[in-house]
């Protein structure tokens, strides 16, 4: 008897075209590259000037902003965030929907309390 692999919530949700579109939209908004690009734009910071600020070259920053951060070490991403006077917040979320919501509420509640 062969074991069938259970699908994840994400895999099941992506079967619905509308849901897949929403997932892609929100996933892209949360990608590190897009977050860094958004922050650079908000600060009127050019990639070249940012590269100098972090002690890197322009081509490395360009690679980072076009998909390279997915394989970057957390230390590099944290130093880039630090150079923009931002914090890097990491979170590991369960895939199960109710557990995921509970964990997010817990984390967000912590930050609301810490920032109050």
Image (cartoon, rainbow, N blue to C red):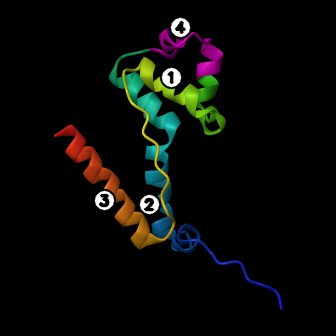
- Segment colored magenta: 46-61
Q: Which residue is label 1 attached to?
A: 79
The 10 Å Cα crowd at callout 4, few under 14, some 14 to 19, many 20 or more, is few
Give the label on residue 105, or none. 3
The correct choice, above or below, for 85 with respect to 87 in the image is above
Proximity of marks 4 and 3: CB atoms separated by less than 8 Å:
no
Label 2 sits on residue? 22
Q: Mark 3: few, some, or many residues within 10 Å (few <14, many ≥20)?
A: few
Inter-mark Cα distance, 2 to 3: 21 Å
Q: Position of residue 33 (x, y in %)?
A: 52, 34
66 left or right of 26? right
Q: Are marks 2 and 3 in contact (CB under 8 Å)?
A: no
Local crowd at mark 2 within 10 Å, few (<14), some, or many (≥20)?
Answer: few
Q: Earlier in the sequence, mark 1 or mark 3?
A: 1
85 lies above or below 73: above
Sequence-first tag of 2 and 3: 2
Secondary element at image label 1: helix
Q: Quadrant of the C terminus?
A: top left
Quadrant of residue 72 within the rendered picture: top right
Cα separation between marks 4 and 1: 13 Å
- Label 2 sits on a secondary structure element that is helix
For label 4, the residue is 52
- Tell me if residue 21 comes above or below residue 63 in the rendering: below
Mark 4 or mark 3: whose residue is earlier in sequence: 4
Label 3 secondary element: helix
Q: Label 2 to label 1, Cα distance in Å?
A: 31 Å
Residue 97 point in image, percent of width and height: 44, 71
For the stretch drawn in magenta, the main secondary structure is helix
């Amino acid at each position: 008897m062969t074991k069938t692999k259970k699908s994840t919530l994400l895999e099941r949700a992506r079967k619905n075209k509308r849901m897949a579109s929403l997932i892609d939209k929100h996933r892209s908004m949360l990608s590190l590259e897009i977050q860094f690009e958004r922050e650079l734009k908000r600060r009127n910071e050019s990639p070249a000037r940012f590269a100098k600020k972090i002690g890197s070259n322009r081509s490395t920053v360009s690679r980072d902003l076009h998909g390279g951060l997915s394989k970057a070490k957390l230390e590099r991403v944290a130093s880039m965030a630090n150079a923009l006077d931002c914090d890097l917040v990491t979170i590991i979320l369960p895939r199960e929907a109710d557990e995921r919501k509970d964990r997010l509420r817990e984390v967000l509640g912590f930050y609301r309390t810490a920032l109050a």
